[in-house]
Image (tube, rainbow, N blue to C red):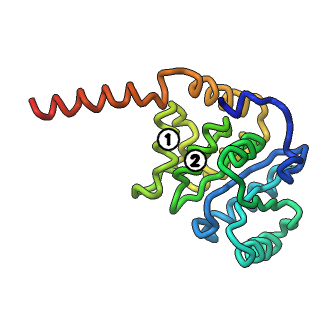
Amino acid sequence: RLIFLEKENIREQFGLPKNGFIFACFNNNLKICPKVFKIWMQILHAVDNSFLCLYASNEISKKNLIKEAEFHNISKDRLVFAEYLPINEHIKRHSQCDLFLDTLNFSAGATAVFSLLSGTPIITCHGDAFHSRMSASLLSSLDLEELIIDTPENYKKRAIELAKNKTNYKLIKDKLINNLISKKYLNSEIFTRELEDKLRNLVI
C-alpha cells in the first residue's frame, strides 16, 4: 500500500507542525556539513512559516544543530527532531513532510527511497562520486531530473522556489506520484530484462 495515497493531515501525530511548509532531512547527522546546514538556514530565512525536520541521531548532535541554527538567527522552534520509528511509521512520517533536502557531500540512499515512496520530493545536487549521487540516480530513474541541481546556490534557489510556488510544487509532487503508480518506473522486471539484453550484447 502506497503511503502517499493517504491524504489526511496527521502531522501532529509525529510531533510536526500542523501548518506551514516542512523541509526534512532524515539522513544521519554525520552527513550534515556546515556548508549545507548554512544553506538550509538561508532557506528557512527565505520561506515564512517553514520548518526543518531532522533525524535525531543522538542528543549531542541535536544540541550542536540547535546551537548552529541559533548562530544563523533561526529559532530552535523551527527545528523538529524525529526520533526512531519502525519503517512503516517512519515512511508515514515522511509523507507528512513537503520537501526532502538532501545532504550534498554524502547523499541519501535508503532514506531517499523512503522519502520518494512516501510521495515526498527530494532536491539534490549531482556530485562527483557514487556516495554523492545516490539520490540523483533515484530521481533520474523516476524521470525527475528537474530536482537534480547543478550547484549549491541553485539548490537553495530551487528549494525556496518550490516552497513559495504552490503551483510548481504541486506539478512536481503529482509527477512523482504518477510515476510511482506507473509500472514503467522502479519496475524490477523491466530493469532485469534491460540488463539481460545489455549483457547479451556484450557477449556478442
Q: Position of residue 111 (x, y in %)?
A: 59, 51
- Does label 2 or label 1 sit earlier along the sequence? 2
Looking at the image, which is closer to me, 180 or 75? 180
Specify the farthest residue to the left.
Answer: 204
Q: Position of residue 67 (x, y in %)?
A: 79, 76
x 89%, y 47%: residue: 12
Q: Position of residue 35 (x, y in %)?
A: 62, 67
**Mark 1, other Cα within 10 Å: few <14 / some 14–19 / many ≥20:** some
Asked where in the image residue 41 lies, by quadrant, the reply is bottom right
Left or right for 188, reference 16 = left
User: What amino acid is labelled 2 in the image?
Assistant: Ala
- Relative height, residue 34 to residue 15 (above, below): below
Looking at the image, which is closer to me, 190 or 30? 190
**Mark 2, other Cα within 10 Å: few <14 / some 14–19 / many ≥20:** many
x 70%, y 34%: residue: 3
- Relative height, residue 195 to residue 89 (above, below): above
Please, what secondary structure does the residue beneath circle 2 have? Answer: helix
Decide if residue 35 is in sight here.
no
Q: Which residue is identified by label 2?
A: 112
x 11%, y 33%: residue: 203
Looking at the image, which is closer to me, 36 or 26? 26
- State the quadrant of the N terminus: top right
- Relative height, residue 171 to residue 24 (above, below): above
User: What amino acid is labelled 1 in the image?
Assistant: Leu
Left or right for 14, reference 147 = right
Q: Which residue is identified by label 1?
A: 138
Asked if disc 2 and disc 1 are in contact, CB closer than 8 Å, the reply is yes
